[in-house]
Amino acid sequence: MRIRVRPNAFVPVVVLVAALLLPATSYFSVNAQQTEAANVEVKIDNFSFGPAAITVKAGTTVTWINRDDIPHTVVADDKLFKSKVLDTDEKFSYTFSKPGTYPYFCSVHPKMTGKVVVQ
Amino acid sequence: MTKKAQNEILYDHNHDGIDRRGFLKCMAWAGTGAVCIMKGGVLNSYALNRIPDRASATAGELTFVQISDSHMGFNKPANPDVAGTLQAAVDKIKALPVQPEFLLHTGDISHLSKPEEFDNVDQILKGIGKPVFFVPGEHDVLNDDGQQFRERYGRGSLGAGWHSFDQKGVHFIALVNVMNLKSGGLGTLGPEQLEWLEDDVKHLKSSTPIVVFAHIPLWTVYPEWGWGTEDSATALAYLKKFGSVTVLNGHIHQTLQKVEGNVTFHTAASTAFPQPQPGKAPSPGPMAVPADQLRTYLGVTNLNYVQGQHALAVVDSTLA
């Protein structure tokens, strides 16, 4: 994960603090989301994820919203993230902090698949 | 062509007693209602209005009813009153000339696995005053891996709720194919359940009539919509030795029937809302129909076993 820090007088201190906190990835993903304010929405409609494949920058928060009359879920193939069941118009968000490819599916209707590529 | 000839199989491609035309006709039953009587693996269909004169011929040792997909809690335009249509199904069953000994519910009891949804269904079905045997649909095992389902309906069952029981010489097998679904896949029974099934039927005589019930169809109806079960072929292989196997499913919210050798596959209508015919819509989502026609798309299935006859008689009727 990359954290962009503006050059200023406190750079050494900031870097030191950052280094100390590196293992706390969740802390950093929250920070990255705030600084980059990157948000991407995926619609669940007609039993499919739209768009089914998206490419985002590390730190992006992806929000799925269910526009179907039937409940769906958003579950990573490797179970890294797993939403509760989403009824109509309910949402689920996940912040992708590390680059990689994250295939996911609806565990209720497993023919529904999607992919998030994090750069 | 005479009317009689239209009901006969014109060309039996698979030598299974049913041709493509016959299969499509079965598909068209959704919303019309029909009686299906199998003899020697051959399917004959009759219009609903002929049921009265078939009733005496099919009265037998065991009558039971299948209901499915009550989706309690669903409240979208396709049916804002699923409690009302479930009650209509109960009324329909109570009015049957021969009362069923018990009911099978082939899953999606609830819409969102909420306790009050299950409570509501239990309360309405109590009106029939008969035992009900349940298998879970995918809507019944949301969020808790089916724990609530097992606590409510799975007493004496194994794994995620599979079990078997005998009634008047017929062996009933309840299978669960909605757990641990894999990305891109269909319904799944899983190795543990298959092993149990093999063991369960090993000691039975091949003349024992078998009724299998599970939520997702155990034959491949339409894989693009997930309407099938990955490992159903293994399960059916264990049942090959039996002369009469009836497989009852739900999930697809329409009646479909197929005969393959000694196996009759049947899916029941929902009591809640219809779904489109395979591939006839962009997705298998709820199909909105005019309110005054809704009940012609919903229904219950009556089954009748006559000792000494080869197969069970299956009668679908609508809630209209």
Image (cartoon, coloured by chain):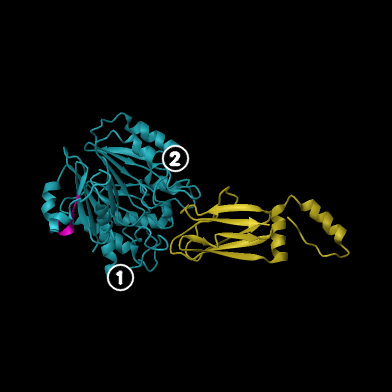
Report the span colored magenta: B44-50
Q: Specify the amino acid type for callout 1.
A: Ala
Q: Specify the amino acid type for callout 2.
A: Gly
Q: Secondary structure at mark 1?
A: helix
Which chain hosts label 2? B
**Which picture quadrant has residue B76?**
bottom left
Which chain hosts label 1? B
Instruction: Say which mark, if any, is on residue B291.
Output: 1
Q: Colour of chain B?
A: cyan
Which residue in the rendered view is the most extreme toward the top?
B203
Q: Is residue A35 left or right of residue B124?
A: right
Mark 1 or mark 2: name the one nearer the start of the chain. Answer: 2
Q: Position of residue B260 (x, y in %)?
A: 28, 43
Which residue is nearer to you in this view: B261 or B199?
B261
Regarding residue B31, the answer to whether it shows in the image is yes
Label 2, on which residue?
B190
- Which quadrant holds the C terminus of chain B? bottom left
